[in-house]
Image (tube, coloured by chain):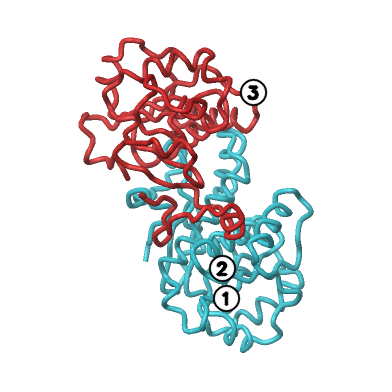
Chain colours: A red, B cyan
């Protein structure tokens, strides 16, 4: 919705999906697969693969759909800016504390801080969750909060904020006083 | 029928999709298609009440997922699920529905007229594309009752009781059919108002391999209206 196919600046609808080692990365893998069926051309960078069988199957599904997996992330940012229309940041989620400072996440985030094409962060901008606020953080253009916005989403200053993951039962919403926005019709995302 | 089973097998063994994944996407498609054809505002009952009849296999599982999403879309689903496989997948889906306050009927309404009174729509999630042979009870009597119901029936993948390839002229005549993955041969005998395609998960390579010639889904929609 944020980057419809006709709006993309590059000739090919390429998207780089950067996946971290845990659940946020796995969500990125599923996202890449659906992007492919929406006729985008995703490429995945997934340096530290989870041993979880479910996540390993997500990887197989992507491979069998001819989604390429990069063997390394260029440190030369211009290469990324030139090759892709957008980057999906599925590196770290809300649970990340220790992982943020360790490789390869630290190096990935260091590179992503300098790219100029739009970044779409899944659930939380990677690296934001652990800090109270930092000048060295990545600045996503789009944030997709999963189930409900997280605390650090308050600091989000990008162009579009979506809530996605329309699966919270009503009593869970009430119990945690989530007051989620109303999803239109049968949509599974809503723009805030 | 064999081709549909072969595609399924390939999705599970080669592509490593789990039954859970595909069932979730299938059930979501069904709920989405239903919401497009029968929006809550179109119901003449005071609440958009839907009866979801779930069979003993995967089609029933699709029905449970569909019921849960219908609830999220603002409908009031009620489930009848007489034969429940004791597998974690189905037990999980049942729990998810119950925890979302979706009632499970202890018995099937005795008369078609009761169904017409209480519900604006029936979802037929009894038998799917693996169905072969004779209909075992209690589904025989359930289908006889459903054949006399006047509110619309939406069948998941195959109208229950139909031969998967040849149909059944004197069987259930649903108003809506949601074909999953690709329409089955029986769909040629479908005479209802709405035919939707759902289950947008078949990788392009597989579509080519089986010459499915699927039409293009609009945008990011998970359903496509065929008629």
Residue that label 1 marks: B172
Tag 1 or tag 2, which sits nearer the N-term? 2
Residue that label 2 marks: B159
- Residue at image position (57%, 31%) is A95
Q: Residue A159, labelled with which disc?
A: none
- Residue at image position (57%, 80%) is B119
Q: Residue under mark 1: which chain is it in?
A: B
Give the residue furthest to the right: B86
Q: CA distance from mark 3 to mark 2?
A: 41 Å
> Crowding near pointer 2: few (<14 within 10 Å), some, many (20+)?
many
Give the label, 3 or 2, closer to the camera. Answer: 3
Depicted A100 relative to depicted B216: above or below: above
Q: Residue A51, labelled with which disc?
A: 3
Q: Residue under mark 2: which chain is it in?
A: B
What SS does tag 2 mark?
loop
| Left or right for A100, reference A41 | right
Q: CA distance from mark 3 to mark 1?
A: 47 Å
Q: CA distance from mark 2 to mark 1?
A: 6 Å
Q: Are marks 3 and 2 in contact (CB under 8 Å)?
A: no
Residue B76, horizontal then vertical, whole percent: 56, 71
Image quarter of the C terminus of chain B: bottom left
Q: Are marks 2 and 1 in contact (CB under 8 Å)?
A: yes
> Crowding near pointer 1: few (<14 within 10 Å), some, many (20+)?
many
**Residue sitting nearer the eye, B22 or B215:** B22
Depicted B55 relative to depicted B4: above or below: below
Q: In which image quadrant can residue B100 be found?
A: bottom right
Residue B193, horizontal then vertical, whole percent: 41, 74
Q: In which image quadrant can residue A59 be found?
A: top right
Residue A99, horizontal then vertical, whole percent: 56, 20
**Residue sitting nearer the eye, B226 or A155:** A155
Using the rendered image of the protein, determine whether residue A13 is visible from the camera's viewpoint: yes
What SS does tag 1 mark?
loop
């Amino acid at each position: 919705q944020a980057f419809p196919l006709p709006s993309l600046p590059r000739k090919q609808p390429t998207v780089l999906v950067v996946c971290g080692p845990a659940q946020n990365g796995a969500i990125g893998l599923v996202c890449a697969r659906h992007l492919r069926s929406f006729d985008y051309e995703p490429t995945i960078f997934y340096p530290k693969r989870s041993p979880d069988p479910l996540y390993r199957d997500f990887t197989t599904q992507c491979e069998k759909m001819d989604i390429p997996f990069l063997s390394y992330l260029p440190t030369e940012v211009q290469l990324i800016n030139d090759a892709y229309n957008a980057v999906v940041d599925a590196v770290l989620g809300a649970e990340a504390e220790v992982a943020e400072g360790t490789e390869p996440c630290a190096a990935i985030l260091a590179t992503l801080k300098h790219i100029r094409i739009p970044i779409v962060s899944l659930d939380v901008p990677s690296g934001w969750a652990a800090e109270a606020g930092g000048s060295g953080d990545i600045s996503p253009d789009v944030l997709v909060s999963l189930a409900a916005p997280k605390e650090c989403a308050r600091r989000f200053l990008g162009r579009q904020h979506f809530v996605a993951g329309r699966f919270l039962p009503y009593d869970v919403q009430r119990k945690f006083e989530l007051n989620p926005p109303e999803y239109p019709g049968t949509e599974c995302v809503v723009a805030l | 029928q064999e081709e549909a089973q072969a595609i399924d097998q390939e999705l599970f063994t080669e592509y490593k999709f789990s039954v859970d994944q595909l069932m979730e996407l299938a059930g979501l498609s069904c709920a989405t298609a239903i919401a497009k054809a029968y929006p809550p505002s179109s119901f003449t009952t005071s609440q958009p009440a839907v009866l979801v009849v779930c069979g003993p296999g995967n089609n029933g599982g699709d029905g449970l997922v569909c019921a849960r999403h219908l609830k999220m879309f603002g409908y009031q689903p009620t489930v009848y699920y007489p034969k429940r496989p004791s597998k974690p997948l189905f037990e999980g889906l049942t729990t998810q529905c119950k925890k979302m306050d979706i009632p499970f009927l202890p018995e099937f309404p005795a008369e078609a007229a009761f169904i017409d009174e209480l519900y604006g729509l029936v979802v037929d999630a009894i038998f799917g594309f693996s169905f072969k042979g004779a209909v075992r009870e209690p589904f025989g009597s359930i289908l006889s009752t459903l054949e006399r119901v006047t509110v619309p029936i939406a069948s998941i993948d195959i109208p229950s009781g139909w031969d998967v390839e040849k149909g059944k002229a004197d069987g259930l005549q649903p108003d809506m059919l949601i074909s999953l993955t690709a329409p089955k041969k029986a769909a040629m005998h479908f005479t209802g108002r709405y035919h939707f395609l759902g289950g947008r998960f078949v990788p392009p390579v597989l579509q080519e391999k089986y010459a499915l010639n699927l039409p293009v889904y609009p945008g990011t929609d998970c359903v496509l209206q065929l008629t």
